[in-house]
Amino acid sequence: MINLENFFSATRQTGLIKHHATLRRALVDHYENHEHGRSQEWDTTLARMPAIEVAEYAFDADRISLTLPRSTDLDVELFRSQLKTFMPWRKGPWQLLGIPIDTEWRSDWKWNRLRPHIMPLADRKILDIGTGNGYFLYRMLGDGARLVVGVDPTRVFLYQFQLVQNLLPTNNAHLLPLRCEHLPAFDYFDTVFSLGVLYHRRSPVDHIFELLSFVRGGGEVVLETLIVPGDVKTILVPENRYAKMSNVWFLPSTDALENLLCRAGMVNVRTVDVNQTSVEEQHATEWMDFQSLNDFLDPVDSSLTTEGYPAPRRALVIGNKLE
Ligand SMILES: C[S@@+](CC[C@H](N)C(=O)[O-])C[C@H]1O[C@@H](n2cnc3c(N)ncnc32)[C@H](O)[C@@H]1O
């Protein structure tokens, strides 16, 4: 089990302290009391990984890279096999102590799409809902954020994050293995991201209200989600699976999504990007060897999913909480 005390000590002097008790209870209920079937294997591997502080690191490049000090010997093949224990590697790419990790997603492409449209992150306090393994948390630190807190319930991603953290000097990135439904209404963060989460939520409207409860008055919400073509009245609820995923509930048009955000009280709402997901951006690799986008599309007509729905297309919508 990963020790999360660093989050509590790093945020003791901040406005988050009043939520510590709630967060500790949530972590007991949803993390400590639910051991994952592979926790022991992951804990053992993590404990055997090299305890080296890297010589250099770069968070501002597309591939996040951590460089081994020149004088340090590393059993490269052992390290590679340890990294593979934590497959699937979905978000990246990374270059860890000389080993390139080609992830399922070119997450840097998403970052490059959203970056020109958001408030500059320098000195901001950020919450990233559904952060995955924290790739975006480091990109945020690379842009000068003061504090970055990610939330994601998928255990293997917490281990990926922790093995990177173990190689870095102390920094202000944190990942809490919780769902956003478990979080208190912080009313604190300058920017709240929710990238690729809304369509997984059975209560999408509640998700919007949650995001607004986390951000401070005047702060920014950056939402990215799957959308479908259509007008303000269009919302697709897949009959069963969507792109072979059984946990997709809600695909609005951009107009319907904007309407929903305004209705929830967000201001300055605008769609800044719409992008058809390509098989270059999402594909199986040596580090994520399950099925990927190519297997989810109709083999004859790639504008459709295997179920006959419009193929994955994502919108980036930004708005603010009222001052
Ligand atoms: C499609 S991935 C998106 C990851 C990343 N934000 C990105 O845009 O590439 C969805 C992530 O949300 C996480 N997730 C699903 N339900 C969640 C919830 N209720 N609260 C927080 N995270 C959630 C999943 O574990 C997964 O890592």
Image (cartoon, rainbow, N blue to C red):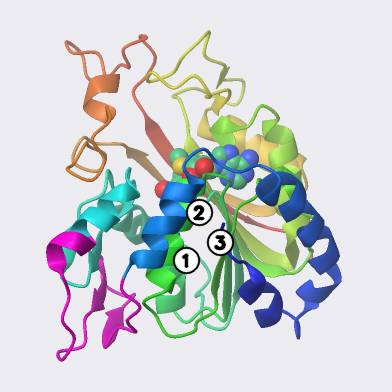
Q: Closest to the observer: 176 or 3?
A: 3
For label 1, the residue is 137
Query: What x and y, as percent, mark residue 74?
Result: 17, 75
Between discs 2 and 1, the one toward the N terminus: 2
What amino acid is labelled 3 in the image? Ile
Query: What x and y, as percent, mark residue 109?
Result: 29, 54
Q: How far apart are marks 2 and 3 (CA)?
A: 17 Å
Q: Which region shows up in magenta?
A: 50-79
Between discs 2 and 3, the one toward the N terminus: 3
Q: Residue 131 carries which label?
A: 2
From the image, which quarter does the N terminus lie in?
bottom right
Q: Residue 5 carries which label?
A: none
Is residue 73 within the magenta segment? yes
For label 3, the residue is 2
| Quarter holding residue 291 | top left
Q: What element carries label 3?
A: loop
| Quarter holding residue 69 | bottom left
What amino acid is labelled 2 in the image? Thr
In this view, the residue farthest toward the bottom is 71
Q: CB of mark 2 within 8 Å of CB of mark 1?
A: yes
Q: In this view, does 217 lie to the left or right of 42?
A: right
What amino acid is labelled 1 in the image? Leu
**Which residue: 17% across, 64% down?**
99
Is residue 72 within the magenta segment? yes
Q: Is the CB atom of the residue marked by disc 2 within 8 angstroms of ligand 1's nearest atom?
A: yes
**Which residue: 50% across, 65% down?**
118
